[in-house]
Structure formats: structure tokens, C-alpha cells
Image (spheres, rainbow, N blue to C red):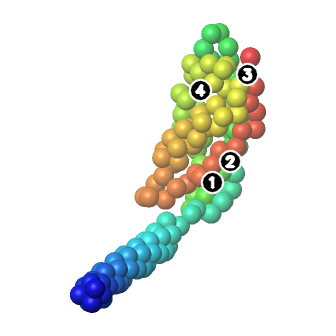
Amino acid sequence: MADENKESAAEAPKKSKKMLMIIVIAAVVLIGGGAGAFFMLKGGSAEAKAPEKGSVTAIDDALTINLADSHYLKLQFALQQTTDAGTEEVDTSEAIELAIDEYTGKTIAELETEKGREAIKEDLLKKIVKAYTEDKKEMVMGIYYTAFVTQ
């Protein structure tokens, strides 16, 4: 019986040292991961500066766009420029062409729900931002619908 107590006492320190090592390693991994995430997020936000709103350029005439199944869309919108664009209005010709290309052939079902309109608007915005980016400076950052009528 005395031998059993000695063996138990000898095993206890081995287990506690093993458990202590696991805890130390886990703490180091968690602290290292947290510090890495902090520096990555902090560095990324400094580099990716959000553009500031500038002037708004309205498209004067409403567009009439052919949809699927003999329907049409009457669309009018404005471009939200960035401060990088300056005070001069951007040429809207390319934005008009992109809007016509984006909406031509769409169905009424795609446009009658808010989710559908927003998805198509997001696609159009991405194309417009890309088209109006010069020397890595975005000249346009948003679009606003001023008329949106389907029939």
C-alpha cells in the first residue's frame, strides 16, 4: 500500500507539468493571434481610406429602357461624386450607357422587389465606379434613383 501512494505522488507532478505546458501554449497562441489580428485590422483601415462625398451630378433626361416581355423601364438617376472629382461635373455618357446595358432585358419580376432592385443597383454601381476611376482615384461613389417606373 505504501508503494501505491509513492506511485500516485510521482504521477501527479508529471500530469500537472503537462497540464501547465498545455495552458501556457494555449495562452501564447491566443495572445499571439489576438495581437496579429489587431495589427492587421489597424493597418488595413489606415490604408483603405473611404472616399468623401463631393457634388452630385444629375442625369437630366429620363431613360426609357426595353425590358423583357414587351415591358419598359423609365429610369432617371444622379451620380454621387467624390471630393477627388473636384467641383466639375463628370461626363454622364458612360454611366447612361452602363445603365442601359445593365437593365435591358431584365424582367418585371426582377425589378418589382426591393431585393431585386438593390442587387441590380449594386451591380450597376460597381461598373460605374470602375468606369469613373482615374489613377486609382474614384470619381463616383454612389448613384441615386430620381425616377424608376416600370410598365
Identified at 62% across, 10% down, the residue is 69
Amino acid type of the residue tagged 2 in the rendering: Thr
Q: Earlier in the sequence, mark 3 or mark 4?
A: 4
Q: Look at the picture and state if 136 lies above or below 11.
A: above
* Structural distance between the alpha carbons of marks 2 and 1: 7 Å
Image depth: mark 3 or mark 2 in front? 3
User: Which secondary structure, mark 3?
Assistant: strand
Q: Residues within 10 Å of mark 1 (few under 14, many from 20)?
A: many
* Structural distance between the alpha carbons of marks 1 and 3: 27 Å
Q: Earlier in the sequence, mark 4 or mark 2?
A: 2
User: Which secondary structure, mark 4?
Assistant: helix
Residue labelled with disc 2: 57
User: Which secondary structure, mark 2?
Assistant: strand
**Which numbered tag is attached to residue 81?**
1
Residue labelled with disc 3: 150
* Structural distance between the alpha carbons of marks 4 and 1: 22 Å
User: Which secondary structure, mark 1?
Assistant: strand
User: Dots 2 and 1: beta carbons under 8 Å?
Assistant: yes
Amino acid type of the residue tagged 4 in the rendering: Tyr
Q: Look at the picture and state if 70 lies above or below 83.
A: above
Residue labelled with disc 4: 103
Identified at 69% across, 22% down, the residue is 73
User: Dots 1 and 3: beta carbons under 8 Å?
Assistant: no
